[in-house]
Amino acid sequence: MSRLQRVRSNLRKAYEAGRESVRMARTDEPATVDDDEVEYELPAQPATFEHHSTASQDDAEVPHSLRIAAAWSWRLIVVGVVGWVLLRFIGIISIVVVPLAIALLLSALLAPAVGWLSKARLPPSLATFLVLICGLAAVAGTLTLVVTQFVDGLPQLTNKASAGIRQIQDWARTGPLHLSDAQVNQAIDSAQDWINSNTSQLTATGVATAATLFELLTGALLVLFATFFFLRDGRKIWRFLVRLFPVNARWSLSDAGDASWATLGAYVRATVLVAFIDATGIGLALVFLKVPFPFPLAALVFLGAFVPIVGASVSGAVAVLVALVDQGWIAAVIVLGAVILVQQVEGHVLQPLIMGRAVAIHPLVVIIGIASGVVLAGIIGALVAVPLIAVLNTGVRRLARRRPEIPPDAVFVTAGERT
């Protein structure tokens, strides 16, 4: 046998010996059985159903609709409690919140003028100062003219009001009521007694009004300073507030804030334009009929138009009452027709055309918001309610979107590019 054959034979014997040793080792180990092939016999248990949203078997016995209603209920209770606490807190610091809200409205109105002056390469502080000075001058001039006309025409209006009261007394005697002199005098005495009995309350109200004069002065100063800094540093303030939130929420919150601010600006400017048109229409009717105080009444209509639906109607009613006292019922009817005509033009032409879809809110929501604002904060609440609803409507809609629109000038910085 050659040497190569002997080597081959030895390798074959070693290989067979290795296989035999492996075979013997396998026979010594306990046999393993696949778990899939074994059938286990479990004790009989009643079939139960466990919903994926339940934490225990007891919850599974509660109807699904009832569990959903309970989940909504306790969450709404928590939201309601938080909202109530927030409203109470705002009521406590209302002396600060109300001026800040007015400052926001003024800032939204004056921001385009500041932006226009800033584009003319004026420093931001100087542009803001010039806009505020011009606004204060316009307000002061208007108030001066209103007060002057009111003081000059008040004696004449008082005399005519007295004559009107005498006419009402004569009508009560000779009209369809046929009241006797004793009954008329009794009604006058009752009114006089009511005034005398409530003198202390009226005096207390006057004292309280005098006591709040300091609060009004401080509130006006706060409005002035807050408006200045909102106009000059509004963008920086908003960026600082956004940085307080988590990183993942900053982009969406910033986008919603920008959209809400644009809505607020559009609402305020549109309201000012609509109020000016209302005041001009009713003022021209008062001038044509030679009703006293045409400019003060027009200014009252202008201010009342900032409360949608309700404000212009109330201020128009004051104009009708003045026309009734001074010119008689014919002039009052004509003024009433002018007020109704202006209201119809405002509701069907100006509001849809000027406001646009950006701040379109259902009239029912507007009425509910104004009523709630009056209950919570009086006249200021009525003024702030509608713009607040418009801002929240836009902000919530933007936040509800899954992906905010990325501006074309956005710059994305990777981790390696940060310094």
Image (tube, rainbow, N blue to C red):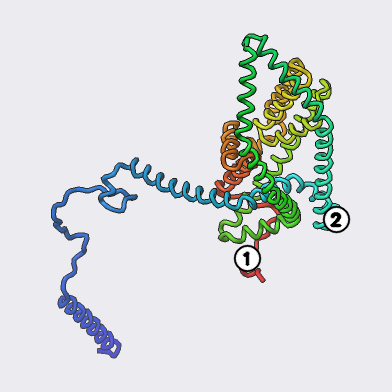
Does residue 210 lie above or below 327 as drawn? below
Q: Secondary structure at mark 2?
A: loop
Mark before the other along the chain sequence, 2 or 1: 2
In this figure, which residue is indicated by the disc labeled 1? Answer: 414
Question: Label 2 neighbourhood size at 10 Å, few (<14), some (14-19), many (20+)?
Answer: few
Could you tell me which residue is drawn at 83 percent across and 58 percent down? Answer: 123
Q: Where does the image place residue 324, in percent across and percent down from the top left?
A: 74, 20
Could you tell me which residue is drawn at 15 percent across and 76 percent down? Answer: 27
Q: Nearer the viewer, residue 37 or 239?
A: 239
Q: Which quarter of the picture shows residue 3?
A: bottom left
Mark seen at residue 121: 2
Q: Which quarter of the picture shows residue 263?
A: top right
Q: Nearer the viewer, residue 17 or 365?
A: 365
Classify residue 6 as left or right of residue 152.
Answer: left
Q: Where does the image place residue 235, in percent across and percent down from the top left?
A: 70, 56
Could you tell me which residue is drawn at 74 percent across and 56 percent down? Answer: 229
Q: Secondary structure at mark 1?
A: loop
Specify the farthest residue to the bottom: 3
**Which quadrant would the C terminus be assigned to in this image?**
bottom right
Q: Where does the image place residue 339, in percent across and percent down from the top left?
A: 72, 24
Classify residue 55 as left or right of residue 296.
Answer: left
Q: Which quarter of the picture shows residue 300?
A: top right
Classify residue 23 as left or right of residue 198.
Answer: left
Q: Nearer the viewer, residue 110 or 61?
A: 110
Does residue 385 lie above or below 406 as drawn? above
Could you tell me which residue is drawn at 38 percent across and 46 percent down? Answer: 71
Does residue 54 lie above or below 1 as drawn? above
Q: Kindly identify the amino acid type of the residue bearing the numbered disc 2.
A: Arg
Q: Is residue 352 visible?
A: no
Q: Kindly identify the amino acid type of the residue bearing the numbered disc 1.
A: Thr
